[in-house]
Amino acid sequence: MSVLVTGGAGYIGSHMAYELLGAGERVVVLDNLSTGLSWAVPKAATFVQGCVGDQTLVGRIVESEDIKAIIHFAGSIVVPDSVADPLGYYLNNTVNSRALIEVAVKSGVPHFIFSSTAAVYGMTGDTPVGEDAPLAPMSPYGSSKRMTEIMLADAARAHDLGYVALRYFNVAGADPEGRTGQSTPRATHLIKVACETALGKRGSMQVFGTDYPTADGTCVRDYIHVTDLVGAHMAALRYLRAGGSSDIFNCGYGRGFSVIEVIDAVRRAAGRDFEAVMGPRRPGDPAIVVAATERIRGTLSWIPRHDSLDVIVQHALNWERRLAELQRRSGAA
């Protein structure tokens, strides 16, 4: 009996693979390596290179590896890119997810955990925003994820499939043990970009929008440590295995920090200043997105362990230094 982790060579997926292995699970990683990195996959996991939309391949994996749960991370995640290439996002995030869900149903996989996003909410006006808030995505990225949530709900009503959709707020940080972290070239995550700038990998960084209705004019987000996020997935898996009914949960801490506050936290951790260039807003960015977390804490008994912006930033910075060393060694080799 194994767990299939799609996108397991990526940032969150590689952390998930380590977490599952640490819990004694057998893990199969499926990733097409379009953004993932093969070296990020734990050696104890079985790795298959391929696309989640390839139903023949996925069906073969499910049968040969006795897959009883799918944790689905694979997809495209950059909001501005989705605005520029909506059809590409609907293909990768929605069409391919539909293909994966169909294989799960036809193969009798009982449990499915989906990597969704707070982008399904859009500009709700609620702070914090609960799972039952009106949904009004402001980008094709958010819409593509919402479509997959709808497909999962419909499939669960029609078939013997239990699912949990986890709506991520802003994921950051890195494995405290230094085994993996955000390693994708040209990543757009704020904390990673700030850490790269602090270490001189970038000459400067840009702040997108300074005229939002917030205390300092920059966007406010709820940042969750990636280790706590994969802990939420483990809690969801235990919940489904225990007979829990399909549901949707926010993944955040319930409080937000502005872009400027995050940059200042990175400056403190790095012990040096760096340039942050103020620029115009990006399309598709709401002003404030903070999670209501009562449902996940109550229903899944989820308890975060790294609920601190300074801890998140320090772990991200530690990983950025380690990644630079790994890249130097690779270049020397």
Image (cartoon, rainbow, N blue to C red):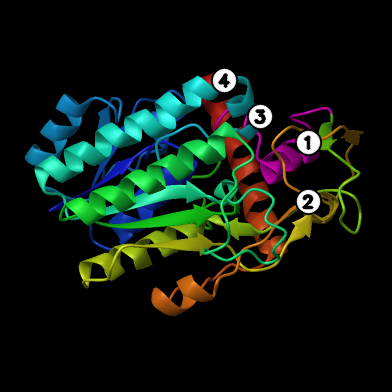
Label 1, label 3: how far apart the Cα atoms are? 21 Å
Question: Along the horizontal axis of the image, is 122 left or right of 112?
Answer: right
Badge 1: how crowded within 10 Å, few (<14), some, or many (20+)?
many
Is 51 colored magenta in this rendering? no
Task: Point out the frontmost of discs 1 and 4.
Answer: 4
Label 2, label 4: how far apart the Cα atoms are? 32 Å
Badge 2: how crowded within 10 Å, few (<14), some, or many (20+)?
many
Dot 1 and dot 4 residues touching (CB under 8 Å): no
Residue occupying the point 50% across, 54% down: 167
**Which amino acid lies under the numbered mark 2 shown in the image of this protein?**
Val
Question: Along the horizontal axis of the image, is 163 left or right of 279?
Answer: left
**Which amino acid lies under the numbered mark 1 shown in the image of this protein?**
Thr
Question: Which residue is the site of mark 2?
Answer: 266
Task: Point out the frontmost of discs 3 and 2.
Answer: 3
Question: Which residue is the site of mark 1?
Answer: 197
Badge 4: how crowded within 10 Å, few (<14), some, or many (20+)?
few
Badge 3: how crowded within 10 Å, few (<14), some, or many (20+)?
some
**Which amino acid lies under the numbered mark 4 shown in the image of this protein?**
Asp
